[in-house]
Image (cartoon, coloured by chain):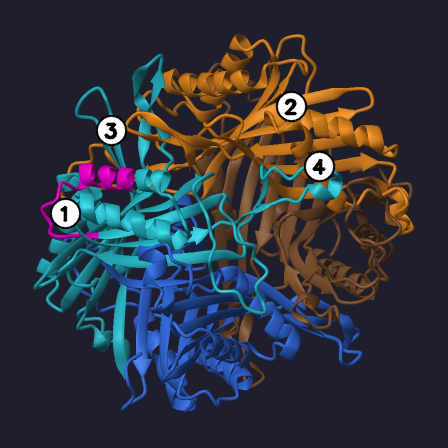
Chain colours: A brown, B orange, C cyan, D blue
Amino acid sequence: MLAESAYGKSRIRIVQLQRRSSLHTLCDLTVAVRFEGDYDDSYAAGDNAAVLPTDTMKNTVYALAARDGLQGPEEFGLRLARYFLDRNPPLRCVRIDLTEHAWRHITIGGREAEHAFERQGGGTRTATVEMTRERTTVGAGVSDLMILKSAHSAFAGFVRDEYTTLPETHDRLLATSMTATWRYENTETSFGPTWYAVRRTLLETFAEHDSRSVQHTLHAMGQAVLERHRDVATIHLVMPNKHHLAFDVSRFGLENRNEIFVATDEPHGLIEATLVRHGGRTP
Amino acid sequence: MLAESAYGKSRIRIVQLQRRSSLHTLCDLTVAVRFEGDYDDSYAAGDNAAVLPTDTMKNTVYALAARDGLQGPEEFGLRLARYFLDRNPPLRCVRIDLTEHAWRHITIGGREAEHAFERQGGGTRTATVEMTRERTTVGAGVSDLMILKSAHSAFAGFVRDEYTTLPETHDRLLATSMTATWRYENTETSFGPTWYAVRRTLLETFAEHDSRSVQHTLHAMGQAVLERHRDVATIHLVMPNKHHLAFDVSRFGLENRNEIFVATDEPHGLIEATLVRHGGRTP
Amino acid sequence: MLAESAYGKSRIRIVQLQRRSSLHTLCDLTVAVRFEGDYDDSYAAGDNAAVLPTDTMKNTVYALAARDGLQGPEEFGLRLARYFLDRNPPLRCVRIDLTEHAWRHITIGGREAEHAFERQGGGTRTATVEMTRERTTVGAGVSDLMILKSAHSAFAGFVRDEYTTLPETHDRLLATSMTATWRYENTETSFGPTWYAVRRTLLETFAEHDSRSVQHTLHAMGQAVLERHRDVATIHLVMPNKHHLAFDVSRFGLENRNEIFVATDEPHGLIEATLVRHGGRTP
Amino acid sequence: MLAESAYGKSRIRIVQLQRRSSLHTLCDLTVAVRFEGDYDDSYAAGDNAAVLPTDTMKNTVYALAARDGLQGPEEFGLRLARYFLDRNPPLRCVRIDLTEHAWRHITIGGREAEHAFERQGGGTRTATVEMTRERTTVGAGVSDLMILKSAHSAFAGFVRDEYTTLPETHDRLLATSMTATWRYENTETSFGPTWYAVRRTLLETFAEHDSRSVQHTLHAMGQAVLERHRDVATIHLVMPNKHHLAFDVSRFGLENRNEIFVATDEPHGLIEATLVRHGGRTP
């Protein structure tokens, strides 16, 4: 009766401080570990003989970080995945999800304070490593990147039916809290620089696109990533449409100049798509 | 390059008040609509000719509720799905997710106040309808049901390695915020009564189970649902292990009687599984 | 330059399990401790000689619970406050805030499961103890009690100006997530039963009131508490007006029967007031 | 019996787009309006004759923004407060709270995209205007500024008692999510530049301080603001101590080098203080 199962530890929060030079650096991660494998007896019979406790998974995260350093999220995820797979025979597939909380040095008069940091904004960096005995997949992403266009955003020419009240528009605010996740072609990518470059491509394409819809811009963003970053095999984008409704001030004898908007969170449109490189396999 | 796509409207909040008798009743739902179909041109070319705006989806939710009433979440989801599928030729699969915010009448001296309500606790009822031109699937669920066992919960006999520090225990607090989702065998089920009965089975099994692990109890709960509710084809359970750590008071010259615990949210174990009826198809 | 200061520990989560009979009971609290006193040297000079670490505050919470039991939130708050005041000469005023997460036994066939619990809904119980060397104040409250009236709720006869668009209404949904906090006349009250009785008075008055505005109903609720509960010296109520906007379905050729509403969180009205017993002192 | 009351509208979200040049600019605010005055009849008698509906408050926010522009939060707050006070005779004190959601232009090759924005991090700017018929107070603040020190942070020499387990430390991580609010000496300040300068002083002082405790650093930060910014009359700082606990890896045969930490949210220390300029009045 047991068709699928998984177990693991979530929200393992680890900060590593590098004191090797006088300029400290920080790596601040939240890690989740997820095991799939031959653990049916623990479910069906309560037999824990094969079960690595999730508490031990957590300890392992801290121990490997202490032993070898965190480096980047993808590298650390690969090391963890390999470690678990090597030592747990029933384990078929291990997945490590990592979220980085980025800090930058506080600057004082143009100079970096060596031991003081402020949290960086601009979307959260994520990484995912999935490893079986046959295959390793590394993915990365940026979540909750809040972006807004105040021109070159239209929505027109759509289906109209008895319940349509939306007017066509050629000049609207388009705002979203974008989440993108992509999978790399292989595990040899230079993950850090690529992440920053992909994020930049997403931002620039969003900024420059002449948008006929969220779908249209989302597609352009994914396409640009696949074209400019050969290491990226496939990308999934999710863009909630955080509607900014023009507030009608003509009721008050004022001219509607399309300048005053009500920002809303709900309801929101929700647009998503996965793009793959030509000849690539689906995710 | 476009491998998959979907679009829709999320967090459509609708409340319907029934005034037919002097005793008012309320149906309070949050609805999400999700379309998959032949919409590639809207992504790749910015051509919206086939696109039903998400604003119209929202209007349709309110209009159908006004015309025919909300009834239960599953019935309303079925009606919405059918409506959208009938009128949108490019639509291949429509998914309606519904969350019910349950209210009960305030009681005064044992009698129900006819027009006054308080929000009910005890986990949130959810429903999902997925409809294609070939097939309709109805699912339901309960999310964030917070439950706790203070006896008959052990965890022992597990793998020990160099990073193991967890002691075996035969007497721990087991607390979780359970989320279960199940799929019905068909679309003819009496959804409301079944939902309450499944929720009851989950609670009772959790209460009575002699637990050797979260996995063990989760499996017993899913198994009980499949055994007692023939309408349920498959069930997926997710149970975070909200660890309650014994606080060591022996440091203060007090006896540790396993009575004082620190409740924690992170890190937490995360256990999940899908159970299917013998001979059933996987979800 | 230092005009005011306070320090303490927040979000101390403690669960106490009572195993004295075969029927277990649980007390689940989140506690905050706050010290005000002669601690200026720790701020101005970094001199910690008078400072009880917040870590020790936390340990004390667990130790006193282990030694004497949690009993109710108010009693435990009184015990903690007295303990801190007795042992810390610079301490002028200690405040203990307590939030109870209530659990009830799961029932199976009408009988209570002895060791299994589900979280109770219906608003959160809070308590506050404030103690100086001269005076002790005990307060209690209920927060986030979600309530709704579907009749006997009007709003009319208000000021109209050039920016008024709101129509008068004699039949609207009134929904709120009420928070009430009250102060007791003395520290001898039977806190548990009183809390349940006050909560009941609030619910019943809300249900039965013929409301001309949120202000009007809020006042009636506070007044009823002061009239029926002589132990309550003063009560503060906060009621956000969670607007439920009628959705206009006449645009779709359907009759507006004032049955379909859009539930909203923002913007919301926010109404608050403090009521004191005649002859009482202000809070 | 009615000792105090207030009513208003919260979470009014307004975005103003400035299109005057080809380089668009955005002002994105969440506004709350709060009235105190002679409104007792609305509470006690349900008489709304003096009540300006909160819906009209909301409309006024949009109308004044459309008529005169948003400018900065403090200026807009002053304009709103004045407007309400002029037109509502029963109004004694109006308070406007404003939160700014800052956006910056996306840059492409070092050049600013004219119509595309990303949300800025680094703490949220807040402002508060309080106006009576006699006096106007303008305050500002920064909330949730996440900062961390990895050196020059000690905590030692504190009180030890039977429940003390915390070791003294001369080298700990100090992390906080700081919230500061300050009041200006008058209403003529150049609010925008001052806000950025105060935020900078807070960051720099935090970075450079040789900390003996959170209290000590908080005081130094407040003192620096009062010394460097003569326009600031008083400042209130709140600094939760987001403990980073050293993870003991010696259990695993590894050397504890004070590099691996567990970041925690609860429990947390909570330190606050108000500093006033010599000769100034308390807030």
Q: Identify the chain of the residue marked 1, using the numbered disc in the image.
A: C
Please, which chain is the residue tagged with disc 3 on? Answer: C
Determine whether the residue tagged by mark 3 lies in a helix, strand or loop.
Answer: strand
Q: Which residue is mark 2?
A: B75
Judged from the image, the secondary structure of the residue bearing numbered disc 1 is loop
Q: What residue does disc 4 label? A: C254
At horizontal 54% and vertical 57% (from top left) the residue drawn is C267
Residue for badge 1? C231
Tell me whether circle 4 and circle 2 mark residues in contact (CB < 8 Å): no
Q: Which residues are magenta?
A: C183-201
Disc 1 and disc 4: Cα gap in Å? 53 Å
Question: Identity of the amino acid at label 2?
Answer: Glu
Q: Residue at x 30, y 25 (%)?
A: B110
Q: Name the residue rendered at 22%, 77% in the picture.
A: C41
Quadrant for the C terminus of chain B in the image:
top right
Q: State the SS at label 4.
A: loop
At label 1, counting other C-alpha atoms closer than 10 Å, the crowd grade (few under 14, some 14-19, many 20 or more) is many
The amino acid type found where label 4 is placed reads: Leu
Asked whether C119 falls inside the magenta stretch, the response is no
Q: Is residue D171 above or below residue C189?
A: below
Task: Give the x, y percent position of residue A219.
Answer: 83, 51
- Amino acid found under the numbered disc labelled 3: Thr
- Identify the secondary structure beneath mark 2: helix
Amino acid under disc 1: Asp
**Do callouts 3 and 1 point to residues on the same chain?**
yes
